[in-house]
Image (spheres, helix red, strand yellow):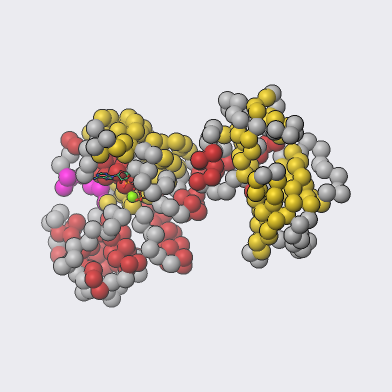
Amino acid sequence: MAAIAVREVSKHFGSFTALDRVSIDFPDGGFYALLGPSGSGKTTLLRIIAGFEFPDSGHVTVDREPVESVPVEKRDVGMMFQNYALFPNMTVFDNVAFGLTVRHLASDEIRRRVGEVLELVRLTGLEGRKPHQLSGGQKQRVALARAIVIEPRVMLLDEPLSALDKALRVEMQVELRRIQREVGITTIFVTHDQEEALTLSDRIGMLRDGALVQEGAPGEIYERPSSVFAATFLGDANIFQGTAEAGGLRLADGTLLAVSDNAGAAQSQLAVRPEKMWLQRSDDTPAEGTNVIEAQVSQHIFAGSSVTYLLDWQDQTLKVFAQNRGEGVLPLGERVRICWSPAHSVPVEP
Ligand SMILES: Nc1ncnc2c1ncn2[C@@H]1O[C@H](COP(=O)(O)OP(=O)(O)OP(=O)(O)O)[C@@H](O)[C@H]1O
Ligand SMILES: [Mg+2]
């Protein structure tokens, strides 16, 4: 159990800024997802937290102690690297056992724990294989087993489940969360899978070009993205441009899009999530107090339980997500109204 604090951490590689004054508190026993585009600094941050890399400025503490003050072998950090970093000449068993062997555990204790964790990652029976005899997903699970087996206080997982098929990934997500909860391991994991970040984590941090752009609980960050980037990187969003004024956003054509929560600074962009919108035929009376714009259906993507509509509106394509309530799919070319509540107009920074 450990609380990790990252304070004003910057890291440069030559003239390139990989991390730019990043500060994050990782709560004790929490499950924290780091999200961000490729090259945004996620791995670099994990490596600095693990103490494998040193920041140029700023510092990292684990339970208030600077990471570098604790020798590597005493750090009690289970790390899973993006490239797995398995020992090529060692068997699956020895790869997983490594962290226990260096801690001088008794051999029957090692056998028991390795056996348990291999069962957990569904690799029982492959103990004798070498990494080159494994598939990508199997190697990934060996790396995960190696991080878990030492029952660390801190787990740093770099895309731990990316190589697994959907069914196995969901199974491993459940297991990961269970272990993490049972043992109360402070876990930081990197993922490109938005749904994984939203469903698994207690908190999410979003990195962009080495800077932390937003942080919060999954619900907060999804419902109240602070920027166009955050709104479109995590989930889908329709973005409207205009001029901020009291009560909302004035579009170029004169329409006022109402905003109910004007607490944020006045922004000249609004984000609206596709599932917050609904479509109405043009001859229906619009509901009182909703935002309404006229658009034309240009595509519909039928996915069984839902339909995603793409609509032409001015020079933009908007997206509206509709549950399949058995009312049929609106035909292409149909002129419709897109409606949404002012509560779901989220002012966002550019
Ligand atoms: N040792 C290094 N020397 C020079 N540049 C580096 C080094 N390590 C990382 N970088 C650069 O720093 C930036 C951040 O890299 P990092 O690996 O942290 O990204 P990431 O967010 O993990 O990306 P991905 O999602 O692709 O794994 C990248 O532009 C990368 O090229
Ligand atoms: Mg990376």
Confirm whether the magenta stretch covers residue 74: yes
Q: Quadrant of residue 109?
A: bottom left
Q: How far across and down, in percent of the image, does residue 247 sit?
A: 70, 27
In the image, taking residue 203 as reference, residue 99 lies left or right, namely left
Is 273 rendered above or below residue 64? Answer: below
Residue for point 24% across, 55% down: 150
The residue positioned farthest toward the front in the image shown: 315
Quadrant, the N terminus: top left
Asked whether residue 231 appears in the rendered view, the answer is yes
Q: Image point 27% across, 59% down: which residue?
A: 84
Going by the image, does 105 lie left or right of 16? left
Q: Which residues are magenta?
A: 72-78
User: Depth check: 332 or 304 in front?
Assistant: 332
Q: Is residue 292 above or below residue 58?
A: below
Location of residue 19 (image quadrant): top left
**Residue at x 51% of width, y 46% of height:** 234
Task: Count numbered badges in the picture.
Answer: 0
